[in-house]
Amino acid sequence: MANQFHLLNNSTDDQQQNHNIQPRSIDDYLDSAYQHSCNTSSHNGLLHDILQYWRYYIIFLALGIANSGDSAEMGATNYILSSETFQHDILGSDNDTDDDVDFAKRGSAIAGAHFLGMLISGLLSGVLADIVGRRKTLLLGLLGNTVVGILSSLARNALELCMLRFLCGINLGMVIAGVVTLTAEISPPSKRGRFMTLVASCYTLGFLYTALWALLIFKMSDDGSGYGSWRLFMFINAIPTMVAATLVTFFSPESPRFFLCRGRLKEAVQVSNLIASRIGYIDNPLSEEELRQYLYQAKGIGETSFRAKETIEVQNVDQTSSMREVWISLLSIRQVFVRGYWRTTVPLQLTYFCLTLTTGVATWWTKIFQMLQLQVDPYALSFYSTLSQIPGMMLASGLIDFIGRRRS
């Protein structure tokens, strides 16, 4: 069955032509499409390019807002824990002191529930994205967090809110898996670092969005004690996720590399050409035969291509058991710890672990500022500390493709 796809079955003239013309990969095609659009629109100005190619840039806008919704949900707990109305409704306070507020059990359970959900989801979301698709995984997480965000504003007690925050963490993991892979796989390779950094920087904007609304809602008295509606705050906090779900539904395509690794070359070519057309490149579209030739000619091009060739040859795209595929995908995780890859994987994991520690402490920032009884309003102080991240975000987006990922 595989012989019908092999280059040796081509005619002599076709073989000669294939040797003379190097077939393009998806990355090659997207990069040439982007470079073509840059060359043809270099004198038109940034605004003109955005208006002309808005259907391409709105994909990354949708992914950026999805990332913002993630951070908004993660940052929400920091502000509601400091709200006296929340303490009265959920944590058991019925006076103006902290004596009857159960921060040690109820508060910490609510603050940590979404981290537990993210831990579980982090192990499974990547597998889900490889089986059902990056876009579907992302949409599932966004729609789930939209529902969870609305229900959180209606929670009646700590147990309900803790369960909702756990489900929020499950959805956060799916959103992260979808955003990261989609951004990487539809970006032009030469500018991949910049596009990924711009989408990742929206994470800071999500924290900023949450901090701004906390400042407006909870700063209802001169001492910043938090006499605001935490339920209104939780509902408003879910808006970025709602917007992202809408934009992804209407404007974001599936990753062409997902179709490629599933052996679905027709869909991979269709999506690649769709993305290229949104950048204004329609002169030399990618063909299914060209992509097939690339798979069989290129050497050392990764596990994805080997898997795609195997799927094409046996023609059993939909015959593999879902549970068996999940198990195989979980076992494949060990590949990042063998053959010297652990030297890169372990430091990156430790770095992310340290970042997570910082995020965990940030869950209590505003409450810590309240306890210190500083002259500056605690909600304003949280807003300023979040605002300080923007210069670093802008610097990273400018340097990531110039000096490299590792140095940045």
Image (cartoon, rainbow, N blue to C red):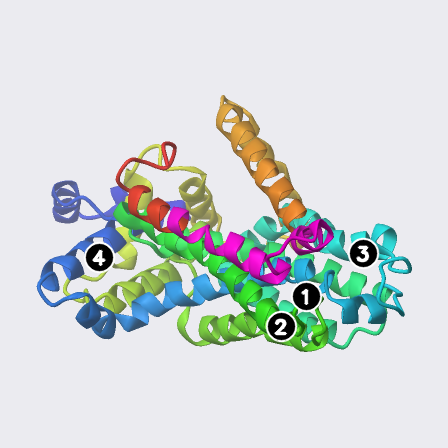
The residues bearing labels 3 and 1 have C-alpha atoms spaced at a distance of 22 Å
Decide which of tag 3 and tag 1 comes sooner along the chain: 3
Image: magenta residue range: 363-392
Where residue 274 sits in the image (x, y, percent)?
A: 30, 67
Which image quarter holds the C terminus? Answer: top left
- The residue identified by callout 3 is 107
Decide which of tag 3 and tag 2 comes sooner along the chain: 3
Q: Are marks 3 and 2 in contact (CB under 8 Å)?
A: no
The type of residue carrying mark 2 is: Thr
Callout 3 crowding tier (Cα within 10 Å): few <14, some 14–19, many ≥20: many
Q: Are marks 4 and 3 in contact (CB under 8 Å)?
A: no
Identified at 63% across, 49% down, the residue is: 362
The residues bearing labels 1 and 2 have C-alpha atoms spaced at a distance of 33 Å
Decide which of tag 1 and tag 2 comes sooner along the chain: 2
Where residue 391 sits in the image (x, y, percent)?
A: 38, 50
Residue 223, label in figure: 1
- Residue 384: say if magenta: yes
Residue 34, label in figure: 4
- The residue identified by callout 2 is 146
The type of residue carrying mark 1 is: Asp
The type of residue carrying mark 3 is: Gly
Callout 4 crowding tier (Cα within 10 Å): few <14, some 14–19, many ≥20: many
Identified at 61% across, 68% down, the residue is: 214
Q: Main secondary structure of the magenta part?
A: helix
The residue tagged with tag 2: helix, strand or loop?
A: helix
- Residue 341: say if magenta: no
Identified at 77% across, 67% down, the residue is: 84
Q: Nearer the viewer, mark 4 or mark 1?
A: 1
